[in-house]
Image (spheres, helix red, strand yellow):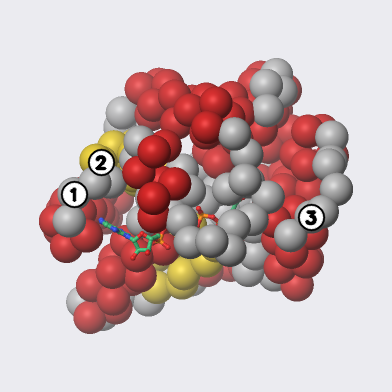
C-alpha cells in the first residue's frame, strides 16, 4: 500500500501479527515463535497492542480497566492513537533494522472489534487506521480461531472490559475475523485454536519460514 505519511520505509524485517478472540492463545504462540526465531539467530521484538510505548500502556489501562462506558468512536480513536505511537516509535525502526516484529494484535483487531463488534463503519475504520499506521500492513497474520464458549472457559475470574462483553459481541468479532482472513488468504494463516499449543507452534513456524524465504528472494 502507498504510504503517504511516512518516509519510504527501508524495510528489511518482517511484521508478524497474532489475532483472535479472548484467550485464543496469542500470547502463548507469540512467545513460542519468538523463542524459535531467536534460537535460529533472528533479531526478534515482541510487542502487544495496545501497549509497547508509554502512551500505549496508559491507553491499555484506560480501555481495559474502565469502569464507565465509552462511545465506540472514542474507543476507536484511543486504540489508533496508541498504534500511531507504536508504529512510528518502535515498529518501523525495528523493521528498518531487519528485526522480526511479532505483535500480539494490530489493525485487524480494530476492524474485528470496533468494526464488526461495535458496528462502526468498516470503510471509515480502515481509512482512519491507515492514517494511524501510515499504511503499514503485516507480512503475515496468524488467526487463532476459538469458539466463544471455549474462550469463556479459558478466561480466569479477573476479566477486563472486553471480556465482560456479551457473547453476541464476541460472535460478531469471531465472524469478522473469518471474513477479514477470507479477503486476503495470502497474508493470513487461519488455525484452529483448540489444537495443542505445540502443534499450533509447528504450523506457525512452517508458514513463517516460507514467508521469510519469499521475502529474502524478493
Ligand atoms: N482490542 C485491542 C480492540 O478492541 N481493538 C484493538 O484495536 C485492539 C488492539 C486487549 C483487548 O483489547 C481489544 C481486544 C482485547 O479484548 P488483551 O489482554 O490483549 O486485551 O486480550 P487478549 O488478546 O485476549 O489476551 P489474553 O492474554 O487474554 O489471551 P491470549 O494472549 O490470546 O491467550 P494466552 O496465550 O494468554 O492463553 C490464554 C489461556 O489459554 C491457555 C493458556 O495457558 C492460558 O491459560 N492456552 C491454551 N489452552 C489449550 N490449548 C491451547 N492451544 C492453548 N493456548 C493457550
Question: Which residue is more in the foreground, 46 or 150?
Answer: 150
Dot label at residue 63: none
Q: Quadrant of the N terminus?
A: top right
Question: Which residue is more in the foreground, 142 or 187?
Answer: 142
Circle 2 SS class: strand
Where does the image place residue 53, in percent across and percent down from the top left?
70, 70
Where does the image place residue 181, in percent across and percent down from the top left?
38, 29
Give neighbour class at mark 2: few <14, some 14-19, many 20+ (Cα, 10 Å).
some
Circle 1 SS class: loop
C-alpha span from label 1 to label 2: 8 Å
Give neighbour class at mark 3: few <14, some 14-19, many 20+ (Cα, 10 Å).
few
Q: Which residue is mark 1?
A: 195
Task: Write down the quadrant of residue 141 in the picture.
Answer: top left
Dot label at residue 66: 3
Residue 57 appears in the figure: yes
Which numbered disc, 3 or 2, marks the residue that appears first in the sequence?
3
186 vs 160: above or below? above
Q: Do tag 1 and tag 2 residues touch (Cβ < 8 Å)?
A: yes
Residue located 64% across and 55% down the image:
160
Give neighbour class at mark 1: few <14, some 14-19, many 20+ (Cα, 10 Å).
few
Task: Write down the quadrant of residue 123 in the picture.
Answer: top right
Which numbered disc, 3 or 1, marks the residue that appears first in the sequence?
3
Where does the image place residue 131, in percent across and percent down from the top left?
73, 38
Query: Left or right: where does residue 186 sit relative to residue 112?
Result: left
Amino acid at each position: 500500500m502507498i504510504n503517504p505519511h511516512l518516509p519510504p520505509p527501508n524495510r528489511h524485517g518482517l511484521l508478524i501479527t497474532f489475532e483472535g478472540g479472548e484467550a485464543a492463545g496469542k500470547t502463548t504462540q507469540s512467545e513460542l515463535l519468538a523463542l524459535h526465531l531467536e534460537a535460529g539467530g533472528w533479531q526478534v521484538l515482541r510487542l502487544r497492542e495496545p501497549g509497547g510505548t508509554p502512551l500505549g500502556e496508559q491507553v491499555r489501562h484506560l480501555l481495559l480497566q474502565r469502569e464507565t462506558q465509552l462511545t465506540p468512536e472514542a474507543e476507536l480513536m484511543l486504540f489508533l492513537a496508541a498504534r500511531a505511537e507504536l508504529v512510528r516509535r518502535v515498529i518501523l525502526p525495528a523493521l528498518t533494522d531487519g528485526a522480526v516484529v511479532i505483535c500480539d494484535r494490530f489493525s485487524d483487531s480494530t476492524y474485528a472489534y470496533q468494526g464488526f463488534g461495535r458496528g462502526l463503519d468498516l470503510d471509515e475504520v480502515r481509512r482512519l487506521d491507515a492514517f494511524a499506521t501510515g499504511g503499514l500492513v503485516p507480512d503475515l497474520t496468524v488467526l487463532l480461531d476459538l469458539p466463544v464458549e471455549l474462550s469463556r472457559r479459558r478466561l480466569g475470574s479477573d476479566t477486563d472490559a472486553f471480556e465482560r462483553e456479551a457473547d453476541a459481541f464476541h460472535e460478531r468479532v469471531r465472524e469478522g475475523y473469518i471474513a477479514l482472513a477470507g479477503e486476503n488468504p495470502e497474508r493470513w494463516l487461519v488455525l484452529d485454536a483448540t489444537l495443542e499449543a505445540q502443534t499450533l507452534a509447528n504450523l506457525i513456524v512452517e508458514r513463517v519460514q516460507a514467508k521469510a524465504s519469499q521475502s529474502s528472494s524478493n
